[in-house]
Image (tube, rainbow, N blue to C red):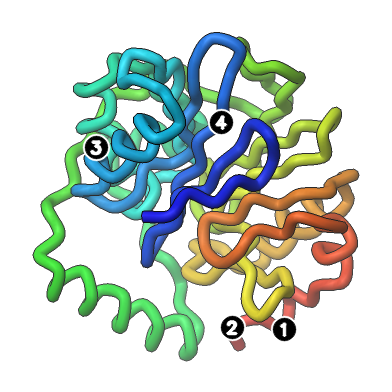
Amino acid sequence: MELIQITPAVWQLPFPVGHVHLVRLPDGYTLIDTGVPGSAPAILDALDRLGGRPRDVRQIVVTHSHLDHMGSAADLVAATGARVLAGALDAPFIRGTAPEPEPVFTAPERTLHEQISAGFADANMPPVKHVPVDVELHDGDSLDGWAEPVRVLHVPGHTPGGIALHLPSSGVLFPGDIVATAEGRAILGPFNVDRKEAIASFRRLAALEVETVCVPHGLPLVKDGGTALRSAAPEDDWV
């Protein structure tokens, strides 16, 4: 798979469903999300192409509990020994100690979800392995070990405990599934447990000073990302 360099320290590893981002730290790497189950070999290969080794992965940040984001976390922990960080309210779903709430689909979302689920079945995707969460993140927390400040934002709606990461100095945003892109524009991510709450989280992210938006679904917004977020109409998406 082709690695897409987004900034001098951030790469996107695109997957058919659920991209993974690799971030270079002063002394290693952070992985943001882990793809569906079975994605670990491709992620470790991407790390190798960047000159990293499995033991160089310091953190695995899971933006939320859906299987295309936490699906390979257990395999990557086994390979790297990295700590897993996730939003506090999603941590029980990632650990497997509580049932994950179901999304409330609009009609277009249901059709898309059925197509994606059929693709997973055709691909014989391995079962999900739950994984311990070492650090539960809350709104306003910061992450250690990065080359610049990283602010954690609680952005509920897609899941109860979804998080985004904002790097104010460089204007980089990792929004989780609150934001996707399509045809060069920012849209609300589908499959939300609370659509109204997800739209409010989208609007919160749109109020940030942002240049680059590293979305898990779609192409990254590499210029004027904040303008794209503020120009979006999430209320009109997926209806």
Relative to 5, is 66 on the left or the right? left
Amino acid beneath label 1: Asp
Q: Earlier in the sequence, mark 1 or mark 3?
A: 3
Q: Quadrant of the N terminus?
A: bottom left
For the point 60% across and 64% down, which residue is it?
219
Q: Position of residue 99 (x, y in %)?
A: 28, 47
Which numbered mark, 2 or 3, is in the foreground of this view? 2
Q: Are marks 4 and 2 in contact (CB under 8 Å)?
A: no
Q: Position of residue 217 (x, y in %)?
A: 52, 63
Q: Position of residue 165 (x, y in %)?
A: 66, 36
Instruction: Say the numbered circle drawn on residue 128.
Output: none
- Between 129 and 169, the one lying in front of the other is 169
Q: Secondary structure at mark 3?
A: loop
Disc 1 and disc 3: Cα gap in Å?
Answer: 34 Å
Above or below for 79 versus 19: above
For the point 40% across and 82% down, which residue is it?
112
Amino acid beneath label 4: Val
Disc 3 and disc 4: Cα gap in Å?
Answer: 27 Å
Above or below for 84 versus 33: above
Q: Earlier in the sequence, mark 3 or mark 4?
A: 4
Which numbered mark, 3 or 4, is in the foreground of this view? 4
Q: Secondary structure at mark 2?
A: loop
Q: Secondary structure at mark 4?
A: strand
Determine which residue is flagged by label 4: 23
Q: Earlier in the sequence, mark 1 or mark 4?
A: 4
Determine which residue is flagged by label 1: 236
Relative to 143, is 59 on the left or the right? left
Above or below for 16 versus 115: above
Determine which residue is flagged by label 2: 238
Q: Position of residue 150 (x, y in %)?
A: 71, 25
Disc 2 and disc 3: Cα gap in Å?
Answer: 29 Å
Amino acid beneath label 2: Trp
